[in-house]
Image (cartoon, rainbow, N blue to C red):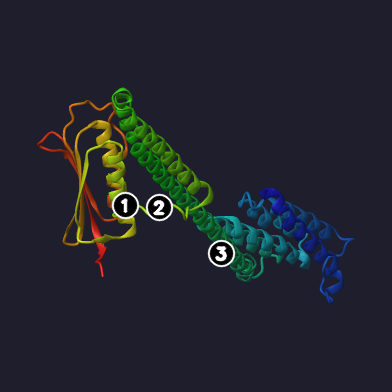
Amino acid sequence: MTTTRRGLVPGLGCAVVAVGLLALLPLVADGEPVPGIEERAWWFLLATVLVQSAAVVGSQRRPELLLVVAAVPLLPAVAAPSAGFSVTAVGVLVGTFLVVLHLRPLSRAALVLAAAVLLVGLGQAVNDGGAAPVAALLQALVVVGLPVLPALVVATQREAREARRQEVLALRREQEALAAAVAARERTAMSRELHDIAAHHMSGIAVMAAALGRLVETDPDAAKRSAALLRDQSRAVLDDLRRVVGLLRDGPDADRPTETVGAVAGLVAARREAGADVDLVRSDDGAVPGPLAQLVVYRMVQESLANAASHAPGAPCSVTVARHGDRLSVTVTNDPSDDVGRASGGGFGLVGMAERARLVGGTLAYGPIPSGGWEVRLTVPVEEDPA
């Protein structure tokens, strides 16, 4: 609804009340000399209240129209003064209420209200023939000031409702932003899971496929075993990919194996079956990191072995798990390779490892070693000691 249409209701109400009072004046005058419908003064007052009502309609949008509402009564006061002049106060009351209600900041309305007081007081004084100008001014102050307080109360309530509405909208936007951030983190985590799965299994498949080509002619039985391992690795990567997709579609997979520090031995064993030269050395004294930290350890070893197979194919690797005070240290080292790895650099594996380490309060360091190989070292806090 536009401002003009909203003002039409109080304008019509002002006209109905003012005209009704004007019609009832002769009936309730109680002997006072008020104009009747047959007198010119009555028609002057009727025209005045109708013009005031029309000005009230636009006073919400143009506060200066309140001056028109206050000035128009000067015409009947000069042309036909009468005891019915008080009817013109209805338009001033309604116009003042609307101006105070809609004009912000309120300081902007101060000049308009002051001018309205002077005009109303002048009109009352002229209608009274110039007698008691102070009383006329006080009466004008009452007429203009009376609607200010209720208008301020209504305006304050309206502003409070608007503030609450904006707060609700802000909270809703914040919740949407949080939901978007959570979704982004989930997508990032899922991309890391897919990267880890693909890197781990595919590097193993690549190693076995390379060995299979050499064994077909020299050792057919070993070639058959390698083919079986290759088939098993392919099934494993498909199963893991299904589990990740299942997390997106159906929620947690209760049958998924737990990825812990203890499961690192299984990773090493799988690499050995694939033909890799990998040693595992444990001196962790049964140290037990938190569940999330154990997953970080598992993924770090998985990713590091996959990187070693890709960038240093055929090079011996070693995995060392050791406890140092309240920290568990996991180191994956590979020797230099005579073969040049075909995998290109610039992946997100090391970045993902570092982010996961920070997530559980751990640290990750990596880089070349003096022998010409590569080392990745992860430390995570031990949250509980074995019983």
Give the farthest residue toward the bottom: 30
- Tell which circle, 1 or 2, labels the residue nearer the N-terminal end: 2
Which element is circle 1 on? loop
Which element is circle 3 on? helix
**131 or 292, nearer to the observer:** 292
The CA distance from mark 3 to mark 1 is 66 Å
What is the crowding at mark 1: few (fewer than 14 residues within 10 Å), some, or many (at least 20)? Answer: some
- Please state which of the two labelled residues, at mark 3 or mark 1, is closer to the viewer: 1
- Tell which circle, 3 or 1, labels the residue nearer the N-terminal end: 3
**Residue 282 on image: x %, y %:** 20, 53
Which element is circle 2 on? loop
Residue marked by disc 2: 257
Q: For the point 46% across and 54% down, which residue is it?
A: 255
**Residue 234 on image: x %, y %:** 42, 36
Looking at the picture, which amino acid does disc 3 mark?
Answer: Thr
Q: Quadrant of the C terminus?
A: bottom left
- Residue 107 has which mark? none
- Residue 156 has which mark? 3
**83 or 128, nearer to the observer:** 83
**Residue 378 on image: x %, y %:** 22, 49
Give the farthest residue toward the left: 370
Q: For the point 53% across and 58% down, which residue is it?
A: 168
- Residue 263 has which mark? 1
